[in-house]
Image (cartoon, grey):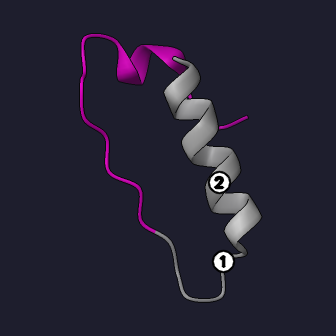
Amino acid sequence: DELRREWFDQRSVAGVTAGASTPDDVIDEVVARIESY
């Protein structure tokens, strides 16, 4: 819920970084949310 759609307005590329201990499903959820914008 910390992502805001307006951060991605008129952007075609976004980078996502995560620590080694971040579960893959959390990363996948963030990527999916960004892609939905």
Label 2 Cα crowd, 10 Å radius (few <14 / some 14-19 / many 20+): few
The quadrant in which residue 32 appears is top right
Residue 24, image x, y percentages: 68, 70
Instruction: Of the two numbered discs 1 and 2 on the same chain, state the one appearing first in sequence.
Output: 1
In terms of secondary structure, where does tag 1 sit?
loop
Task: Give the residue number, with chain letter if any, for mark 1.
Answer: 22
Nearest the viewer among 8 and 28 is 28
Relative placement, left or right, of 36 versus 10 is right
- Magenta stretch, main secondary structure class: loop
- Residue lying at 43% horizontally and 14% vertically, measured from the top left: 6
The tag on residue 8 is none
The quadrant in which residue 33 appears is top right
Residue 5, image x, y percentages: 51, 17
Residue 20, image x, y percentages: 56, 88
Task: Give the residue number, with chain letter if any, for mark 2.
Answer: 28
Q: Amino acid at mark 2?
A: Asp
In terms of secondary structure, where does tag 2 sit?
helix
The answer to if 37 sits in the magenta stretch is no
Which segment is the magenta one? 1-17
Q: Amino acid at mark 1?
A: Thr
